[in-house]
Amino acid sequence: MAVSYKKLWKMLIDLDMSKTELIQKSKVTTNQVAHMGKGEDVRVETLEKICTVLGCTFDDIAEIIPNEK
């Protein structure tokens, strides 16, 4: 399984918020956002901080992509 954060990037565009602003407001590291940009796993704590700042839920910013068989 893989994780897609496309919903988060679209939300940032819709809110006219840069990744830098998100990092500053949510107090996550640039490395954590870089991992998300590569579709890599991040801690739930990171997602929680982002959701708190954006006023959303995990489902609004991430999506589980099942492996193809």
Image (cartoon, grey):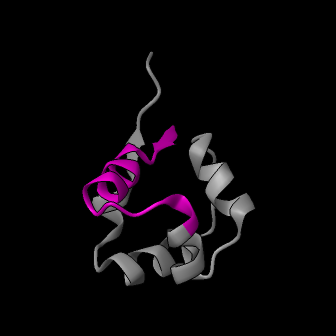
Camera sees residue 41: no
Counting labels gives 0
Magenta region: which residues? 1-20
Foreground of the two, 18 or 2 = 18
Give above or below for 68 relative to 63: above
Q: Residue at x 50, y 81 (%)?
A: 49
Does residue 63 appear to the left or right of 40 in the view shown? Answer: left
Image quarter of residue 55? bottom left
Based on the picture, tell me whether residue 16 belongs to the magenta stretch. yes
Does residue 48 appear to the left or right of 14 in the view shown? Answer: right
Give above or below for 4 relative to 66: below
Question: What is the x, y in percent for residue 26?
Answer: 53, 80
Question: What is the x, y in percent for residue 65?
Answer: 41, 36
Question: What is the x, y in percent for residue 35?
Answer: 67, 50
Give above or below for 44 relative to 17: below
Question: What is the x, y in percent for residue 5?
Answer: 44, 48
Does residue 15 appear to the left or right of 30 in the view shown? Answer: left
Camera sees residue 1: yes
Direction right: furthest residue = 31
Foreground of the two, 50 or 62 = 50
Q: Residue at x 57, y 42 (%)?
A: 39
